[in-house]
Image (cartoon, rainbow, N blue to C red):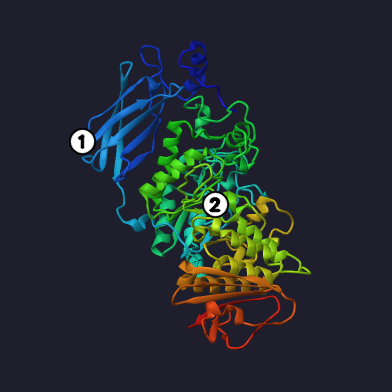
Amino acid sequence: MRTPLPSRTAAGSRALLLAPLLTLGLTLSPSGAEAATLERVEPPHWFLGYRDTSLQLMLHGEGLAAMTPSVDAPGIRIDRFETGDSPNYLFVYLDLGPEASPGRFTLTLEGGGETLTHDYDLRAKNPDPDHARGFSGEDTIYLITPDRFVNGDPGNDNDPELGDPVDRSELCGRHGGDLAGITGSLDYIEGLGFTAIWLNPVLENRMPVCSYHGYSTTDFYAADPRYGTIEEYVALADASRSRGIGLIMDMIVNHIGTGHWWMDDLPTEDWLNFPELRPITTHVHATTFDHNGSAYDRQAFNDGWFVDSMPDLNQRNELLADYLTQNALWWIETLGLAGIRMDTHPYPDKHYMAEWSERVMLEYPQFNIVGEEWHSSPAFVSYWQRGKDNHDGYVSHMPSMMDFPVQEAMRQALLEEIPDWGSSWMPLYEMLAHDFLYPAPQDLVIFPDNHDMSRIFTQLEEDEDLWRMAMVLSTTLRGTPQIYYGTEILMANRESGDHGLIRSDFPGGWAGDSRNAFTGAGLSDAEREAQEFVRRLLNWRKTARVVHEGRFMQFVPVGEIFSYFRYDESETVMVILNKNEAPIELPLTRYAERLRGATRAQDVLTGRQVALDAPLTLSPRSVLLLEIAH
Ligand code: CA
């Protein structure tokens, strides 16, 4: 699939390279050598106002490595320029001094009797800190798989040049959802009470099959046209921001897709890990910090390919490292993001990841990043959080991580049969007791499910009582909740755990859908009630400051009842989850240290007043969400 690396010294391979390029319409100069061309400049433009004033320009085009760059503009200086192993790349490092001003300057390339020029655009970085505000415990995140949510523009469904045409009957096929569909659904998303949106990746995925999931980037500076233009992406970000909804971008620096344009002409021989052998990673995350581990295993995990169609990037190559870091800053600034979700966080070189997160947080101190470390051990996940004092001295700058351990413990506790002794809630209680491992457990992102696992309703065997408990847990435990689209209408993947089925089309997102979750048409009573439950819960949460930033205290589960508090000096919320099959009385005396003599409360879920001066009678398999009146 990949063409061999062109060599600068071997005349034979040079001649081989020439033949296919000629068919692309490149011309010969009078001397007989190919005329130099400038085909790509990345980043396509840049922003003035970063604390680190260096800028790497990756220039790609025929014969560019033989050329010398120059710039004549106030405040802009060429710090150095570097070439790779391909003759067709030039990496120009600029320093943008205080005299540099927004506008265009001319970059000149000279060599072999030829001169090329390029007008490069510098723009002012947005000075408003709210432009890239970050997200926090105040927010509730709606996770959307864009191909499967709403087809706002059927005109962009297919792009003959990119292949993989729309086929809604294929689980792994493109279904046509897009950015315009999300922008058009902001009333619905806002109405449900969400204040942030995380999209699975929407950058170009020029892949022959299964391109819909977006995790095979083939151009770091292009939105996939089947999702829309960069302008439409910006329009979504702006429209969201004006409603107080932040946009979180899914980023992948571990790998690219085999359709990436680099694959036809790799800049350096070490741009990828194992470009010929393509070994698949062991997926054994522990190797990255195993005190007793081998270098062999570390490399087999970090440098193996995620899958055969996802070439593994070598972030130890400094040219690539700078390229990837700048790409993140470019998208934050271009879109005014509220956050980044970093895919496969343990898989790239961990020292690069620390450098990456440090730079992002240096340039955007109020920003937020959440990393994916899919492991059930909080020792694993906490290793990556900013502020962790690690055994090996590793210093990360990731403010947040996905709380996979609590997700798994929550499912386990909810599904657990009632034991002869103790409580089925113990796995969740004990997992939360591990919070001491995290420097900032309140900054984790908590979730009942995501795009990579069975729908929570399926995980809970379609039990509506347990589903309601999962919703309340996910939105009132410490952290920032994330809920996958369709969870609010009990979307399920009954037939199998196939990812394409988990990521099913949202009802009403396509013209002619027989069911419509936006209007309620065709939904069952249970689905409509679930949607109303989520709407009520999240709209309450939006203003429940004590749930955003209050402290968390849990009580040991007793007899199938799990109870906890969110509290500060002035406000208290109490959550009581009861898995008993019959009504049961709950004496409140053991909660005196948090109830502090309060005699009444209001149940957020029903609006009902609840007296606290006598034991509570709990309904079978129920959840109470009490605002305590002090
Ligand atoms: Ca479309």
Q: Name the outermost residue toward the right.
A: 420
Q: Position of residue 270 (x, y in %)?
A: 51, 27
Q: Amino acid at mark 2?
A: Ser
Q: Position of residue 264 (x, y in %)?
A: 52, 28
**Which of the two discs, 1 and 2, sits closer to the camera?**
2
- Is tag 1's residue or tag 2's residue first in the polypeptide sequence? 1
Q: Which mark is residue 74?
A: 1
161, 223: nearer the viewer: 223
Residue sitting at 62 percent across and 56 percent down? Answer: 405
The residue identified by callout 2 is 382
Locate residue 135 relative to residue 427 in the image: left or right: left
Q: Position of residue 252 (x, y in %)?
A: 52, 43
Locate residue 569 relative to residue 205 in the image: left or right: left
Q: Position of residue 10 (x, y in %)?
A: 49, 12
Q: Quadrant of the rendered structure where residue 437 is?
A: bottom right
Q: Is residue 15 above or below residue 212?
A: above
363, 192: nearer the viewer: 363
615, 149: nearer the viewer: 615
Mark 1 is surrounded, within 10 Å at the Cα level, by few (under 14), some (14 to 19) or many (20 or more) other residues, namely: few
Q: Can the viewer see residue 604 in this picture?
A: no
Q: Secondary structure at mark 1?
A: loop
Locate residue 58 relative to residue 626 in the image: left or right: left
Q: Is residue 185 above or below residue 124?
A: below
Q: Is residue 480 above or below residue 125?
A: below
Q: Amino acid at mark 1?
A: Pro
Residue sitting at 37 percent across and 16 percent down? Answer: 29
